[in-house]
Image: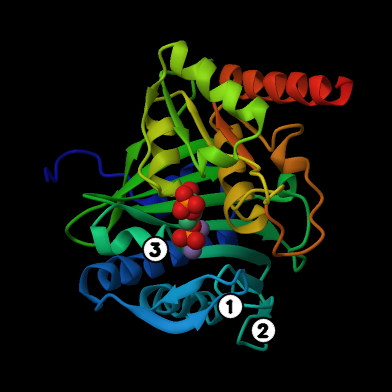
Amino acid sequence: MPFNKKIRTLRAFLFEQGVEGTLRGLICEIAEASKYVDYAIKMTELGFAGTTNVFGEKQLALDVLSDELISSRLGNCGLVVNMASEEQQNIFSSFLNEPGEYSVCFDPLDGSSLVDVNLAVGTIVSIYPGEDLVRPGREQVAALFVLYGPRTTMVVGIQNGVHEFTLNPLGSYTLSRENIRMEESGKIYSPGGDSRKYSPGHAALIESLKNGGHKLRYSGGMVPDINHVLMKRGGLFTYPALEGSPRGKLRLMFEANPMAFILEKAGGAASEGTMRILDVEPESIQDRCPVYLGSKKEVALAEKMLKKSASEKKAE
Ligand code: AHG
Ligand code: MN
Ligand code: MN
């Protein structure tokens, strides 16, 4: 790693981009916590914790440990008011008497079922001003994900754009991609869920992408799969509504909203099939949400095909 090259660290870059001090500190705090999660993924014995989360999903020891690593760090940093974790039942407050200025929703370990097959997993974080957390995603001030892959990278969406930082061997996140921008359309698609349960409109969309030459790129992990669409500057990631799960599988507050914020800030689009994800008014912190995330052209095609299929069904 050449020291003569201008190394732009996370904190310095955020300052350069005009991110205000407390938010800058919070993003850096999350970056610090991610180093412990990165280490835990590589060193912790795999296996189940013997507990289930509020979504009825069996928790891995790593899910619980990642959750503890992040919530204890954020709960004691003095920058946060309230927190919500995909792995915990309720919203909880900072452990200090002096609350901070921001509240966060986080998925401490996304794709945890992939750890035992050594595939990439991630952490997803959504940041709101003040203390409320059950609110539309358009009110986020920042969102980020950490991708624990061959390299550990952190993709940060702030008001002025989306930027990638890579964790170097000295434990420092340095800028690796500045101002990531999505093109109008792309060449890959990532089609989540059980295809036997697709709606006719969604099935038609997947066929249309395939016949149009889009290549299948799917690992089963939302963070690496969305990172793939983002870094190839185009395409579509989707996890749709399914027969029996009309709001799909992914969680609005912990997965859909932060990823939607990032995709829109990168010039892409993010829909739940009929409307912008960031405009969805949540009823609870545990709401689920179908997702179509990627280039504007593919997301518009998805909405058009779903709408056409719904009106044909009505006409029957
Ligand atoms: P989590 O591990 O936080 O529960 O999330 C996993 C999600 C997401 O990463 C991925 O897109 C989706 O689950 C895959 O779901 P299926 O296993 O139903 O395909
Ligand atoms: Mn998840
Ligand atoms: Mn998770």
Q: Looking at the image, tell me whether mark 2 or mark 1 is earlier in sequence order.
A: 1
Circle 1/circle 3 CB separation < 8 Å = no
Q: Amino acid at mark 2?
A: Glu
Q: Quadrant of the C terminus?
A: top right
- Report the amino acid beneath label 3: Ser
Judging by the rendered image, the residue that carries numbered circle 3 is: 112
Q: Observer-nearest residue: 3 or 158?
A: 158
Please name the amino acid that badge 1 sits on: Gly
The secondary structure type at the circle numbered 1 is loop
Ligand 3 within 8 Å of disc 1? The answer is no
Lateral position of residue 135 relative to residue 251, left or right: right
Disc 2 is placed on an element classified as loop
Residue found at x 66% / y 45%: 243
- Answer whether labels 2 and 3 touch (C-beta < 8 Å): no
* Residue 172 point in image, percent of width and height: 27, 58
- Vertical position of residue 110 compared to residue 257: above or below: below
Q: Is residue 262 visible?
A: no
Nearer the camera: disc 1 or disc 3: 3
Estimate the x, y position of residue 52 in percent, counting from the top left.
53, 78
Does 237 sit above or below residue 204?
below
Q: Nearer the viewer, mark 2 or mark 3?
A: 3
Q: Which label number is shown at residue 98? A: 2
Real-space CA distance between mark 2 and mark 3, rounded to the nearest whole angstrom:
33 Å
Residue at the extreme front: 316
N-term mark: 2 or 3: 2
Task: Work out which residue is located at the far top of the displayed protein and give it.
Answer: 212
Please tell me which residue is depicted at 59% across the width and 41% down the height of the picture: 197
Q: Residues within 10 Å of mark 2 (few under 14, many from 20)?
A: few
Q: Are marks 2 and 1 in contact (CB under 8 Å)?
A: yes
Q: Is mark 2 within 8 Å of ligand 3?
A: no
Label 1: which residue? 78
Quarter of image, res 100? bottom right
